[in-house]
Amino acid sequence: MALSTLSRDLIPGWAKIDLQLHQPFRGWFGFRRLRCDWCGERWGRHSCPMRESAARQFVYTASSAQQEAALVSGDITEADLQLRRSQPTGHRRKPSPHPRHSRRSASFTALPLEWSHV
Ligand SMILES: [Zn+2]
């Protein structure tokens, strides 16, 4: 609740977990047809959609030291680091509606804090 509890580790837990879970599945059915071992999605240039969003979140929030450590351990790749740069261009815009937008009742809980203080 408190805003002062900003730790140095800003990476959300789900992003770390997704990066670990979603790995390419190298099956016996050919080299080019990689799939995600966890969710079964097609493994593209930036992995599966779930891992891509996790990697993007990671790149945004991780410190440079954390990114370096993740690179060494293989949790993220060089291609994942490119995600940060490729986003602001807005070239590939998908018309995907975000259900979270309509559920913005979170601002309600933040209000009373200041009021009770005065
Ligand atoms: Zn996946």
Image (spheres, rainbow, N blue to C red):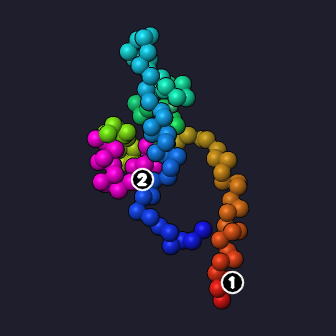
Which of the 4 image quadrants contains residue 8? Answer: bottom left
Query: What secondary structure prevails in the magenta region?
Result: helix
- Mark nearest the camera among 2 and 1 is 1
Vertically, is 12 above or below 77? below
Vertically, is 43 above or below 107? above
Residue at image coords 49%, 25%: 37
Which of the 4 image quadrants contains residue 115? Answer: bottom right
| Residue 62 - label | none
In depth, the one of 52 and 118 nearer the eye is 118
Q: Categorize mark 1 by other alpha carbons within 10 Å: few (<14), some (14-19), many (20+).
A: few
Residue at image coords 50%, 52%: 12
The percent position of residue 19, horizontal first and vertical second, equals 45, 39
Vertically, is 106 above or below 26? below
Q: What residue span does the magenta drawing correspond to?
A: 55-72
Q: Is residue 29 left or right of residue 114?
A: left
Residue 84 painted magenta? no
The percent position of residue 5, horizontal first and vertical second, equals 50, 69
Q: Which residue is mark 2?
A: 60
Q: Secondary structure at mark 2?
A: helix
Location of the N terminus (image quadrant): bottom right
Location of the C terminus (image quadrant): bottom right
Vertically, is 85 above or below 111? above
Disc on the earlier residue, 2 or 1: 2
The percent position of residue 68, horizontal first and vertical second, equals 29, 48
Amino acid residing under circle 1: Ser
Q: Which residue is mark 1?
A: 116
Amino acid residing under circle 2: Tyr
> Mark 1: is the Cβ under 8 angstroms from ligand 1?
no
Q: Secondary structure at mark 1?
A: helix
- Across the whole image, how many numbered discs are drawn on residues? 2
